[in-house]
Amino acid sequence: MPLERVGNAFGRRVWKFFRAWRNRLNRVKFHEKNVCILSMNCTGGILYHDLGLPFLSPTINLFFQAEDFIRFCERLDDYLKIDDLVECFDPDIVQGRPYPVAWLGDIRLFLVHYHSVSEAQDSWNRRKIRMKKNEIVVLATDRDGMTDSLKDRFEKLPYPKVMFVHKPDPIHPSCFYLRGYEQESSVGIVTESTGWLGARKVDQFDWVAFLNGTQKS
């Protein structure tokens, strides 16, 4: 096996060891067990997993385009009344993606980690029943079409919220600048590993305190 691959494999094992250690510490600090994370992408599901919690939100294993996510959060009760996901076949939207895309009313769900729309629909409906609406927090990023006007709407959402951005944004107080994406047009996958000690870009933010309700963005 090439030396580079040996090193990468060893590095992954070291990272996983320290990630497990970090998760144990975070679980000790975490106490808001009913938190409902409405997440624009897979970040929320990963944080649930890290904390050893059941998924108390339907927005798991999928992502939204930015405008659709803001609209979903603005009209949450309306969208939660919809039980049926409708598969999208529009080639301009699907664009050869290896996973299904579905309509929830007039917004699109990109079902990255599902094999079928019916599988996603079952999970969506099962998890939305678990939601505690007085425990909602919102996670977003500046990916997938986020604009300043959408950030303005994000600021008006009536929930604790944070948006991870690739450069400082003093105009929008809910934006949190994650270092390391300055040369990009947006943040990347904020839960990807960085370094050897179990860290990720998202760990620059005290997300445990945020989910506990003791830290604002």
Image: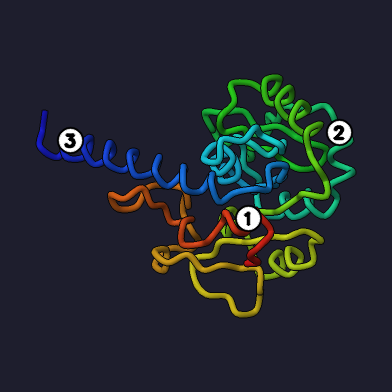
Image position, residue 143 (x, y; %) = 56, 56
User: Circle 1 — which element?
Assistant: strand
Where 54 sits versus 146, above or below?
above
Nearest the viewer among 117 and 87 is 117
Q: Earlier in the sequence, mark 2 or mark 3?
A: 3
Image position, residue 57 (x, y; %) = 71, 38
The residue at which mark 3 appears reads as: 5
User: How many other residues sit within 10 Å of disc 1, few (<14), some (14-19) or many (≥20)?
Assistant: many
Question: Who's the residue at 30% across and 53% down the image?
Answer: 195
User: How many other residues sit within 10 Å of disc 3, few (<14), some (14-19) or many (≥20)?
Assistant: few
The residue at which mark 1 appears reads as: 140
The residue at which mark 2 appears reads as: 82
Discs 2, 1 touching: Cβ within 8 Å: no
Image position, residue 114 (x, y; %) = 59, 26
Q: Amino acid at mark 2?
A: Ile
Q: Amino acid at mark 3?
A: Arg
Quadrant assignment for the C terminus: bottom right
